[in-house]
Image (cartoon, rainbow, N blue to C red):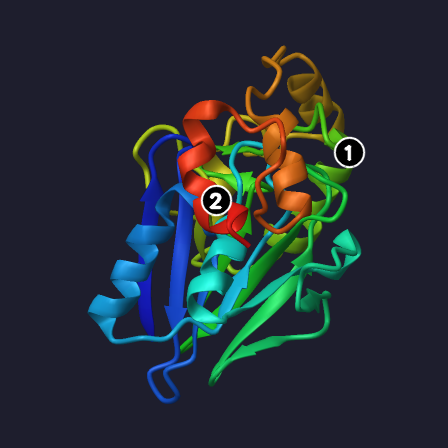
Amino acid sequence: MIFRQLFEIESSTYTYLLSCPDTGTTALIDPVIETVERDLEVLQQLGLRLDYAIETHLHADHITGGRMLREHTGCRLAGPALDELPCRDIGLREGEPMRIGNLVLNPLFTPGHTDTHHAFLLDHAGLPMLFSGDALLIEACGRTDFQSGDAQTLYHSIHEKFFVLPDETLVYPAHDYSERQITTIGQEKLRNPRLGQGKTLEEFVQIMNGMDLPYPKKIDWALPGNEACGACPDNLPPEKERLCELDRQG
């Protein structure tokens, strides 16, 4: 497998490139509009065509690069079917694997951060790799205080879908804010201050409800942009207008 972990600094978002070495079929998980040009350059350097741009959920901290990538490459847009977005080409559901050539990506319905959130599990040569989206981060988890979030639901998602996986499962989150790149299920069960060491549901809910986080600074324009698969909303800040020139031109 060809694999790259790519980082967007402003929103601390990881985008993941997966490519089947047998067929050349290639996907990007959680692309960001600010780094579309970089992603296209990486694809060119690797001699790859982009077939899919895949979302774990409707992000509130950045606009997806999906629509822009489709304009440039003709790739198909995929994400949770529960989002019911007419602009997407493929709706993903748990129990219905997505094939990227000979790679098999298994969607896991993991609500709690948002009510339609999905993670993706890939078994690569016997080594499980989990793309956890915002549900499980490195020694943290996604917030649950906005955008259909619910702490109790997230606790069950993590315990019933993630913590039942082998401890050696590699976890690749959608974000990290401390320059970390990877964790494992075993490490999160031990070290995650919100979930580890057998934290009870009641303890987790108390922790999440007491976080007093600020209002997401981009949500008012990022969320409508993502509901349109990366189109530029009318309330986009002036400093972001340059990112959407192609979209404005149709």
User: From where the camera sits, is residue 32 visible?
Assistant: no
Dot 2 amino acid type: Ala
x%, y% of residue 199?
64, 30
Q: Nearer the viewer, residue 118 or 11?
A: 11
Find disc 2 in the rendering and name its residue: 174
Side of 38 where 75 appears, left or right? right
Instruction: Farthest residue to the front: give it.
Output: 249
Residue at the spot 51% in from the left edge and 69% down from the top edge: 52
Q: Nearer the viewer, residue 81 or 1?
A: 81
Q: Which mark is residue 27?
A: none
Graded by Cα atoms within 10 Å as few (under 14), some (14 to 19) or many (20 or more), the crowding at tag 2 reads: many
237 w.r.t. 15: above or below:
above
x%, y% of residue 99?
55, 79
Residue at the spot 40% in from the left edge and 57% down from the top edge: 16
Label 2 secondary element: loop
Give the image quarter of residue 18.
bottom left
Find disc 1 in the rendering and name its residue: 148
Residue at the spot 71% in from the left edge and 26% down from the top edge: 146
236 w.r.t. 123: above or below:
above
